[in-house]
């Protein structure tokens, strides 16, 4: 029997959110019909029918919610075992919440109240909905682990992307943040790419030649040298320890990406890393990238004022 993965969002939290929707003014599918909404998350044609007249779940929804809407109550979706929103993976449950406030589904006027309500209940389980990107000026929400300090670090990272005028780096930041929960491997792979891009930007700004064949640790080491961040006997113990840790962090990100991140074909039995591991990799990568960039900026400013 397949082992069910561990969920961090409890049944109590899920029931509370569903109960709030039952008694509130927001219909879960928004302006869409049931089938249109659910098809954004599930492949209804691959789920079984509970009605012998149909081959799959898409036929059930068509008959009992579109043709005969009185057959099933509006809240049927919360307890249907095929969708398993009450006990299924956190990623699916969170995707369901995010889709409820997607611009295609919901009027902007209701979004703030809905997100605030969801986040109030999700907080006890360590998750929240946050803006991941915009579409035609409308916010698209993602689910993320709610850890202290994350917003400030990501804001610093986006400032660097702006300084580089790099849509590529901005896209990496979006991928890191947006995929921590739904695709931890992609988030880990993107965190390594983010540091690589910043190192290349620093080296190019300082006109330091690159062969283009440097591996990740080598690229970070070359950047450290360009910034005069070298471990040497003259450094005090604290600085020497910190700079030595940069090498350890670099190697760890590279190894983690190789083991469970995107970019290398993993073994068939490789399991997806937990979202917490992805969050750690993203936070470490952002901290390292911001440190290197701010060191670059500070030394460039000092050089200009000399």
Image (tube, rainbow, N blue to C red):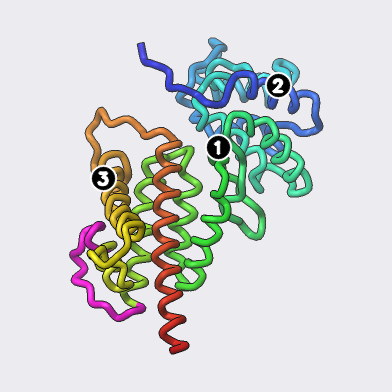
**Secondary structure category for the residue under label 1:** loop
Classify 202 as above or below 78.
Answer: below
Q: Which residue is mark 3?
A: 255
> Mark number for residue 233?
none
Residue stretch in magenta: 205-219
Looking at marks 3 and 1 on the same chain, the residue that comes earlier in the sequence is marked by 1
- As displayed, is residue 34 above or below residue 279? above
Residue beneath disc 2: 75
Give the structural element (helix, strand or loop) at label 3. Answer: helix
Q: Is residue 123 visible?
A: yes
**Quadrant in which residue 276 is drawn:** top left
Residue 216 falls inside the magenta stretch: yes
Q: Which mark is residue 40?
A: 1
For disc 1, the neighbor class at 10 Å (few under 14, some 14 to 19, many from 20) is few
Q: Main secondary structure of the magenta part?
A: loop
What distance separates the C-alpha of mark 3 from that of mark 1? Answer: 34 Å
Image quadrant where one finds the C terminus: bottom left
Q: Is there CB contact under 8 Å for labels 1 and 2?
A: no
Residue 7 in the image, given as x and y percentages of width and height: 50, 24
Of badges 3 and 2, the one in the foreground is 3
């Amino acid at each position: 029997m397949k082992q069910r993965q561990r969920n961090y969002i409890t049944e109590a939290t899920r029931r509370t959110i569903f109960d709030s929707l039952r008694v509130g003014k927001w219909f879960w599918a928004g302006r869409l019909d049931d089938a249109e909404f659910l098809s954004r998350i599930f492949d209804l044609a691959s789920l079984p029918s509970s009605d012998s007249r149909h081959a799959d779940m898409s036929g059930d929804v068509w008959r009992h919610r579109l043709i005969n809407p009185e057959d099933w109550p509006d809240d049927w979706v919360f307890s249907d075992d095929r969708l398993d929103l009450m006990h299924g993976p956190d990623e699916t449950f969170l995707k369901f919440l995010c889709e409820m406030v997607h611009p295609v589904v919901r009027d902007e006027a209701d979004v703030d109240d809905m997100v605030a309500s969801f986040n109030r209940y999700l907080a006890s389980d360590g998750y929240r909905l946050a803006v991941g990107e915009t579409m035609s000026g409308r916010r698209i929400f993602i689910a993320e682990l709610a850890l202290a300090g994350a917003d400030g670090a990501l804001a610093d990272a986006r400032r660097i992307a702006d300084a580089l005028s790099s849509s590529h780096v901005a896209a990496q930041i979006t991928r890191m943040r947006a995929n921590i929960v739904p695709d931890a491997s992609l988030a880990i792979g993107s965190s390594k790419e983010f540091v690589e891009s910043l190192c290349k930007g620093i080296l190019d700004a300082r006109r330091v030649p690159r062969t283009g064949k440097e591996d990740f640790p080598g690229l970070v080491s070359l950047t450290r040298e360009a910034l005069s961040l070298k471990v040497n006997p003259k450094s005090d113990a604290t600085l020497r320890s910190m700079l030595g840790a940069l090498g350890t962090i670099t190697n760890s990100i590279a190894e983690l990406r190789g083991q469970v991140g995107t970019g290398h074909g993993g073994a068939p039995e490789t399991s997806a890393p937990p979202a917490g591991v992805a969050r750690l990799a993203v936070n470490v990568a952002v901290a390292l990238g911001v440190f290197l960039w701010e060191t670059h900026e500070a030394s460039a400013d000092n050089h200009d004022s000399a």
